Amino acid sequence: MEHYVALFLEYLQVELGLALNTRQAYARDLKLFMQALKLQEDGLLGVTRQQIIDYITSLKLKGLAAASIARKLAALKAFYRFLAAEGYLEVNPAEVVEAGNKGLALPRVLSTDEVEALLNQPDLHTVHGYRDRTMLEVLYATGMRVSELMHLKVDGVNLEMQYIIAFGKGSKERIVPLGKIAVAFLHNYLERVRPQLLEEKPDPGYVFLSQGDKEMTRQRFFQIIRSYAREAGITKPVSPHVLRHSFATHLLDNGADLRSVQEMLGHANIATTQIYTHLTNKRLRAVYAKAHPRA
């Protein structure tokens, strides 16, 4: 790995505490950038703003998705911001470069009625059905990532104070509030249902289990949520992340401020959270067009 890139990756790990997957993604994006510009180590310091713009333009011409282009530009921005901050560069060539949002793919969300229909599918008279309903309730109540839900620990749940502790990207810890319905389901699940799933085997400490002492997997939960979506008659693609998007959008629709939503989602940058305002603004425009006499 080139000297400057290695220093940057060390900074991401030691100073920012970013996860291995994130650091590897940054490394891949920087390597592709160097290959595209046919750069050696010393060439990184001589990159101009126009070269970065040309590179981003070439990605667009290749038909790369807007989100992928934005991620690659984010890697370049972070890298050159690091070089400038450490004194390797006087001017950051990526500072004012923007990917643009043409063709921006807005997150898929469920309506409140669709969420209600989805939550009502599990059979509460069965152990697995009650577990599934609890997982769905917690996911929608907190907006957690599916990986955070899978790794939620029993000692990270505080039902008395009505919050859970989630471990997000880069192993960053955050406190997320729980609603009274999710609290009620979690209480019954932990007291009555989870012991049946554990079957007196060693307790791994995770809240949600498959049969025995096995931790629930991402793949299994994807299958579960998609099956319930079909039963609910929801035709749009449904995944755990769609419930996360729905959580954020419904909060903003009902007056929550962007900073609070950012904190609950665990976004490092508020710009990531702002994509949900595109959805709420779109909905407001539709309401205005339907209701205003001169619309």
Image: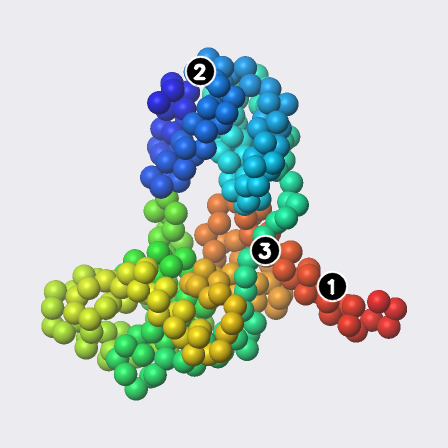
- The tag earlier along the polypeptide, 1 or 3, is 3
Q: Position of residue 259 (x, y in %)?
A: 56, 53
Q: Position of residue 199 (x, y in %)?
A: 14, 74
Q: Position of residue 9 (x, y in %)?
A: 38, 29
How far, Cα to Cα, is label 1 from label 2?
Answer: 50 Å
- Does the image show residue 260? no
| Marking on residue 40 | 2
Residue positioned 65% across, 40% down in the render: 100
Give the camera-side residue of 284 and 49: 49
Give above or below for 31 relative to 145: above
Give above or below for 233 relative to 38: below
- Residue denoted by label 1: 285
Residue positioned 46% across, 13% down in the render: 42
| Marking on residue 211 | none
- Residue denoted by label 3: 106
Give above or below for 16 relative to 49: below
Q: Position of residue 214 (x, y in %)?
A: 19, 64
